[in-house]
Image (spheres, rainbow, N blue to C red):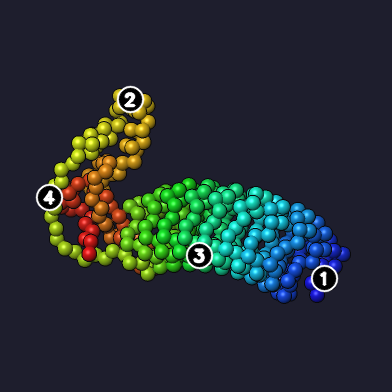
Amino acid sequence: MADTLVLRALRGNARNLDLGSKKLKRVPKAVGRLRELKRLQLRNNLLTELPEELQALHNLTDLNLGNNSLEALPEVLKHLNQLKKLHLFGNKLDKLSPSVFEGLGNLVFLNLNDNKLTTLPDEINRLMELKYLYVNTNQLESIPSKLCLLQQLCELHLANNKLKSLPHDIGYLTNLKKLSVPRNQIQELPEELCILRKLEVLDVAGNQLNIFPTRLLELKLEEFYFEQNPLLEKNLISSTQQNEVLTLQEITARYIIDELTSNSFNSVFKYYPEVRKILENASKCAVCQKSFLNTWLECVKFVEPTQKIRMTGHVVPVRALLCSYKCFNKPGHQYYGIAMP
């Protein structure tokens, strides 16, 4: 049956060929003679490899290998340099060959759902045109920081894995509109997430989150899902704390940061880049708005997101940093200390 379909395609110089759901254990080598082929459907078969002849398909833009028995990425894929959409869902992949990514620089869409991947190779950063990446229902324990070099990435789907954290470099994904990481083991979201100004959908449901980053609500989200997390609850207990004694380093750092607007300080720091780098990592007090370096009080503010956000849940516990117990003891603010059990 498959050979007959290929022969018909050869006679018609076809641009589309559907060999899906044919119980194929091999792809007919004659498919490699379809030089004008743009779309090839091979989903729902029993394939464990691809023939070398497919490397002649230089016009192929869409390849569906979903629901087969591939245990490794076929090396022939690296020759398909016009490929834009690649489906590999529902296979038996436990790792990805870095060399295959060498020739896939035009890939826009990659679906790796329902495999056995425990990691992604650093070489994934070669997919510079990638906009949509699906790696749901795998066994990922981490994602490489180099994935965050994919400047065109619009959607990142990592549901049902074993992730405990996201890389701090996620802030480099400046075009990201949708981040979906539900049902993982993530314990804390990086602050850098909050600089993704194009992010519209954030799904972190079913993780291990207690609190959200300080600037989370600066994001212009349209959808926000965070149910089934062990979030901090608002159970109030009155408390007044004694003012702490700051170290000399902290006192000095706070004074210098306050004076950084002075041209004299800026001219001096050009000779001490290490000092400038340290001071640039300073935080800002949520109460007095002054900067501080190392000594802070972690607090929480319970916020109701704007009505524009479609969300599951009610109030959101957002982290807030205070520079001292002096600010914490001031009346009128809505920041609460976090009581450890």
Q: Quadrant of the N terminus?
A: bottom right
Label 2 crowding class (10 Å Cα cut-off): few <14, some 14-19, many 20+?
few
Estimate the x, y position of residue 62 in percent, counting from the top left.
Answer: 69, 60
Q: CA distance from mark 1 to mark 3?
A: 37 Å
Residue 268's label in the rendered image is 2
* Residue lying at 65% horizontally and 66% vertically, measured from the top left: 70
Verify CB contact (< 8 Å) between mark 3 and mark 2: no
Q: Is residue 311 above or below residue 298?
A: below
Label 4 crowding class (10 Å Cα cut-off): few <14, some 14-19, many 20+?
few
Q: Is residue 315 left or right of residue 25?
A: left
Residue highlighted by disc 4: 242
Q: CA distance from mark 1 to mark 2?
A: 76 Å
* Residue lying at 32% horizontally and 59% vertically, measured from the top left: 211
Residue 180 shows up from this direction: no
**Mark toward the start of the polypeptide (3 vs 2):** 3
**Mark toward the start of the polypeptide (1 vs 3):** 1
Q: How many marks?
A: 4
Residue highlighted by disc 3: 139
Q: Amino acid at mark 1?
A: Asp
Residue highlighted by disc 1: 3
Q: Is residue 22 above or below residue 202?
A: below
